[in-house]
Every structure is written in structure tokens, then in C-alpha cells.
Image (cartoon, rainbow, N blue to C red):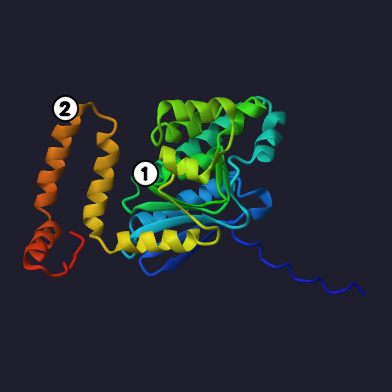
């Protein structure tokens, strides 16, 4: 008689979502794989961000990670396994870079502010993820690097986000040497906003998210979109665009309420419109 088959425990989700009031906490949950961005994890992030986009209950997002490493970039074992494809993996590599780039852009396009909560090392596409988020809080134990050059793979897609966060010379140094940057240096060059004692990064990121969530979601949506659009324009075009945005913003109900509340010395009541 065969022994009864022991039921298998369900596999733990590779991306966890926890909502704390108006804040959605997304946790990369592949600690054994250093939270590398596998095809499945990229898809899970994309799907979850799409769900959050139209969720009016969520006013801010925190991206965190399980284990000692925030994110080690792409899953190189997964990529290397496709070198046996008839085309040497070219089509799959293109697919991964395309869906990852789309996921990163969805963070920028998300109406809600997104805060990276970095407890450990963030390298390559992991560093890209931090740079892509609107804000970042890091543990003093965190390090950041774009070390692709060390393995013959220049971090070209991380470069896009990195060069939109920090100066050219600092970005080139990271990209060409692959050397890690400590948390305090990352703050100095503009890659992160705040550095806190190890173990406090989640608390600080959530506190920041709560402060932001107390603002008008409608106004934050207007401002976030305008910030990224004007950054790609020349000076005159940026001012023309920003003036038009300010005019439309002044017509919003929450702008009228906020200004009246300021004049009346009272707290505003937001309606997110």
C-alpha cells in the first residue's frame, strides 16, 4: 500500500502586497535569488502597479524587499538558460528588456508617488528600480552599483534611470567602474533622499508615504506628471507647459479649497478633484 501523498504547501508569492490605510507596500519576495527581477517578478510588478493605478484608496506606494538584498538586478541564470535557443537567446533577451523597461516606465506614469525602501544592496536593474521610484529611503547599510561592466554587460537600461537622477560624472563613474556607492554617498549625489539607521528604513519610508498621502491625490497626480514631462523639455517650452499646468491646477476644486483653507487658517478638506 502506497503511503499517502503529503500535500504540497502553496508556493510563496514572489511579490507581496500589503495595504496600510492609503499606502500600498509592495515587497519583492525572492530572497534566495537576491530578489532578482525574473520574468515572473517583472510581470507581477507590472500587474500590481496596473491594479494600483486606478485604485482611489491608494495614495502612495512603497517598494520594499525581503531578506538582506534589495534587488540584484536581472535574473542572470534565467537569461543564460536561453542561450540554447535557436537564436542564441536574442528574442528572449529583447523580450525581458522590453517588459522591464515598460514596468519601470509604469512607475513613472503611476499617478501615486512611489517610494523605494532600500534595506540592502541594489545593483544593476535593482539600482535602476531605486532610481526610477520618485523618492527613496535607504538604510545606512545599503549600497548601490551598476556592475554590469564587470561581467561584460554595460548597464545600459539602468543608465536611463540613473542619469535622470544624478550628475553625468557620478553616473559615468558608477557605470564604467561598477564600484559600489555607499548609502551616504548615494544621498549626496541624489540617488536617495534619506539615509537612516539599519532597521528603520521601512518605518521612515512609511512615515514619508503617510505625509504624502495626506495631500490631495489629484494635485499630486498633476504635479508628478508635470515634473517628468517638463524635465525632458527645453527651458522656454518647460515654462510654457508649466504655466498651462498651473492654470489648469488653479481651476481644480482642491486648489480652491486649499487656498481658502490657508487664508482662513484651517485644515483643508480634499476631494481629490
Residue designated by label 1: 108
Left or right: residue 176 versus residue 135 is right
Q: Earlier in the sequence, mark 1 or mark 2?
A: 1
Task: Identify the image quadrant of residue 65.
Answer: bottom right
How many numbered marks have been drawn onto this rendered protein structure? 2
Q: Distance between the Cα atoms at labels 1 and 2?
A: 23 Å
Observer-nearest residue: 266 or 133? 266
Left or right: residue 31 versus residue 168 is right
The local crowd at label 1, few if under 14, some if 14 to 19, many if 20 or more residues have their Cα within 10 Å, is some
Question: Quarter of the image containing the C terminus?
Answer: bottom left
Is residue 132 visible in the rendered image? The answer is yes
Left or right: residue 126 versus residue 112 is right
Is residue 129 visible in the rendered image? The answer is no
Question: x and y percent of residue 2 in the render?
Answer: 90, 72
Assign a secondary structure to mark 2.
helix
Question: x and y percent of residue 153 in the render?
Answer: 61, 27
Say which residue appears at 50% left-offset and 34% top-offset: 158
Question: x and y percent of residue 128 in the render?
Answer: 49, 39
Residue designated by label 2: 236
Does 156 sit above or below residue 22? above
Observer-nearest residue: 39 or 194? 194
Question: Quarter of the image containing the N terminus?
Answer: bottom right
Res. 40 mark: none
Say which residue appears at 19% left-offset and 65% top-offset: 270
Amino acid at each position: 500500500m502506497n503511503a499517502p501523498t503529503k500535500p504540497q504547501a502553496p508556493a510563496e508569492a514572489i511579490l507581496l502586497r500589503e495595504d496600510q490605510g492609503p499606502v500600498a507596500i509592495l515587497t519583492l519576495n525572492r530572497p534566495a535569488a537576491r530578489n532578482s527581477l525574473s520574468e515572473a517578478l517583472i510581470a507581477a510588478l507590472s500587474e500590481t502597479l496596473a491594479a494600483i493605478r486606478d485604485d482611489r484608496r491608494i495614495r502612495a506606494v512603497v517598494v520594499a524587499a525581503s531578506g538582506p538584498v534589495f534587488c540584484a538586478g536581472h535574473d542572470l541564470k534565467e537569461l543564460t538558460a536561453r542561450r540554447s535557443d535557436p537564436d542564441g537567446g536574442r528574442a528572449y533577451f529583447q523580450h525581458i528588456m522590453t517588459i522591464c523597461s515598460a514596468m519601470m516606465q509604469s512607475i513613472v506614469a503611476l499617478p501615486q508617488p512611489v517610494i523605494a525602501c532600500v534595506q540592502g544592496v541594489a545593483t544593476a536593474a535593482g539600482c535602476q528600480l531605486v532610481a526610477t521610484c520618485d523618492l527613496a529611503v535607504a538604510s545606512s547599510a545599503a549600497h548601490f552599483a551598476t556592475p554590469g561592466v564587470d561581467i561584460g554587460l554595460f548597464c545600459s537600461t539602468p543608465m536611463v534611470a540613473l542619469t535622470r537622477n544624478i550628475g553625468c560624472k557620478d553616473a559615468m563613474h558608477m557605470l564604467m567602474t561598477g564600484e559600489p556607492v555607499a548609502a551616504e554617498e548615494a544621498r549626496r549625489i541624489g540617488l536617495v533622499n534619506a539615509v537612516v539607521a539599519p532597521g528603520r528604513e521601512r518605518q521612515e519610508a512609511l512615515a514619508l508615504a503617510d505625509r504624502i498621502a495626506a495631500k490631495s491625490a489629484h494635485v499630486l497626480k498633476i504635479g508628478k506628471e508635470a515634473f517628468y514631462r517638463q524635465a525632458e523639455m527645453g527651458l522656454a517650452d518647460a515654462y510654457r507647459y508649466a504655466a498651462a499646468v498651473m492654470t489648469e491646477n488653479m481651476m481644480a476644486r482642491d486648489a480652491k479649497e486649499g487656498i481658502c483653507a490657508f487664508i482662513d487658517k484651517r485644515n483643508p478638506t480634499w476631494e481629490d478633484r
